[in-house]
Amino acid sequence: MPVFISYSHSDELIVNKLAAHLVKHNANVWVDTWELNVGDSILNRVQDAIQESSALLVVLSKTSVESEWCKKELSAGLMRELDEKRVVVLPVLVEDCKIPLFLREKMYADLRTDFNRGLHKVLDAIAKVTNADQGRLEQDEGTVDWSEDWGYNEGLFHLRFTIVNSPDTLPMTFLTQIYVFCNEVATNRYKQYENSGLDWIGRAVIAEALFDFGEKNDFRVILDNQFPQEIKATIADPKTGSAYDVVCESRKMGQDNGKDQLINISDYLKQIREYMRSVSRKPNPEELVKIHAIIASPWNA
């Protein structure tokens, strides 16, 4: 879900600067001048963007606090924050002005004298709704926390998803780790993305292969004791020679209730995929050119 920036067009220069820096940090940003095309219904597109956003940055200046349009955008954002309790509404001060009464109690980012310091405040505030590498999944029986990490081992690349499920109804916690080990061909492909400054796209490609595999195959384990249960599989493409070895390991910890526990790993992967897609930004035109060039190149290049 994007980060919506509400502002007066008189502040367009600093807003574009802020938005560009957020994009560099892989935030999915919605700015009207970037998104609207000739013939678009401005009102409908803006309403849809606010409804779908996960954060609303309110750029405060002398002009914006007097703008009726900005007031409407802010009102819509605050209503969502009150209703859903997860939408971030963050004031961003770009010049001395009278802060609206209902925003005075909120933490704000100050770009007036130190842009970089203010930018980091923005990044800190929106991290929970823009970080595609970790998150929390809310479920009826409790929360599921997860994170993704990666690295190289003996020259081969790997991804790992760590998932912790702590049900409210059980006196125990379930730990699942999913490893994706790339062979040499798959590692070389990832390095192509990495060398082009698109490492996040390279990881997304590997993760999507895992998610597809999890959707087509029923990944479930039954935990009947404290020892980890393991599932192994291989995702291979004979045409390219690329392969991912997948290892899923689940275990239960805490107070034993004497019952077997079913862990649906496929369901975890489905929810993580939905979350990652919702917060990840789209590649810009320059990045798309690089991506198409990589796709057209040999996997062993």
Image: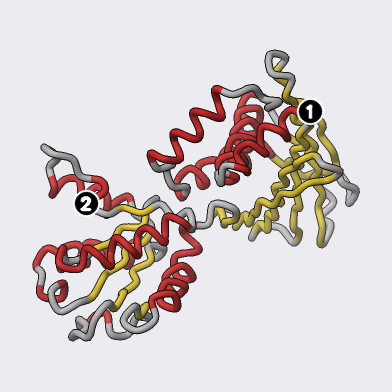
Q: Are marks 2 and 1 in contact (CB under 8 Å)?
A: no
Instruction: Give the residue number, with chain letter if any, for mark 1.
Output: 233
Seen at 41% across and 40% down, the residue is 286
Residue 194 in view? yes
Which residue is at 82% across, 31% downward?
Answer: 232
Image coordinates of residue 135 in percent, x first then y, are: 57, 56
Left or right: 8, with 173 as reference point: left
Q: What colouring does the structure picture have?
A: secondary structure
Above or below, comparing residue 67 to residue 217 in the picture: below
Q: Which callout, 2 or 1, points to the residue nearer the camera?
A: 2
State the image coordinates of residue 216 (x, y, percent, origin top left): 63, 24
Report the amino acid beneath label 1: Ala
Secondary structure category for the residue under label 1: strand
Is residue 192 positioned above or below 19 on the image? above
Q: Is residue 100 left or right of residue 274?
A: left
In front: 73, or 215? 73
In the depicted structure, whether residue 261 falls above or below residue 23: above
Q: Which residue is mark 2?
A: 33
How far apart, in angstroms, are the residues tagged by discs 2 and 1? 46 Å
At which x and y percent is residue 89? 33, 69
